[in-house]
Amino acid sequence: QEAIEYYLESLAIYRKSYVDHHRTVLELRELIGDVYDTSGKVSEALKYYELVLKLRQRHCPADADLSELKKKIEHLRKR
């Protein structure tokens, strides 16, 4: 729980200075998803992973590797 609080606080700080698709903001969101996943909070993890995927698809180069993120999402959907 402490990790989630730290990451959420960091995310709020970074979002004041950067756009939602900034690399650091996306990395923080994915880390939050990882912590939720590890904690067994599947729906919360999916929420963060899917948002990161959506933003990366929209704003990252077409050749960006999204396979790991897609694997995380598929793994959670199978639970």
Image: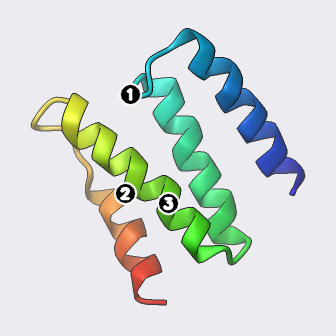
Placement of the N terminus among the 4 image quadrants: bottom right
Q: Nearer the viewer, mark 1 or mark 2?
A: 1
Q: Are the residues flagged by discs 1 and 2 in contact, CB closer than 8 Å?
A: no
Q: Is residue 70 above or below residue 74?
A: above
Q: Are the residues flagged by discs 3 and 1 in contact, CB closer than 8 Å?
A: no
Q: Position of residue 6 (x, y in %)?
A: 81, 38
Q: Residue at x 38, y 27 (%)?
A: 21
The earlier-in-sequence mark between 3 and 1 is 1
The amino acid type found where label 2 is placed reads Leu
Q: Quadrant of residue 39?
A: bottom right
Circle 3 sits in a helix, a strand or a loop, which is it?
Answer: helix
Q: Position of residue 28 (x, y in %)?
A: 59, 37
Give the residue at mark 1: 21
The amino acid type found where label 1 is placed reads His
Residue at the extreme bottom of the image, as rendered? 79
Q: Residue at x 55, y 43 (%)?
A: 29
Circle 2 sits in a helix, a strand or a loop, which is it?
Answer: helix
CA distance separating discs 3 and 1? 16 Å
Question: What is the image's colouring?
Answer: rainbow
Q: Position of residue 12 (x, y in %)?
A: 68, 27
Crowdedness near tag 2: few (<14), some (14–19) or many (≥20) residues, C-alpha within 10 Å: some
The amino acid type found where label 3 is placed reads Lys
Q: Position of residue 7 (x, y in %)?
A: 73, 39
The earlier-in-sequence mark between 2 and 3 is 3
Give the residue at mark 2: 69
Q: Residue at x 26, y 58 (%)?
A: 67
Give the residue at mark 3: 47
CA distance separating discs 2 and 3? 12 Å
The earlier-in-sequence mark between 1 and 2 is 1
Residue at the extreme left of the image, as rendered? 62
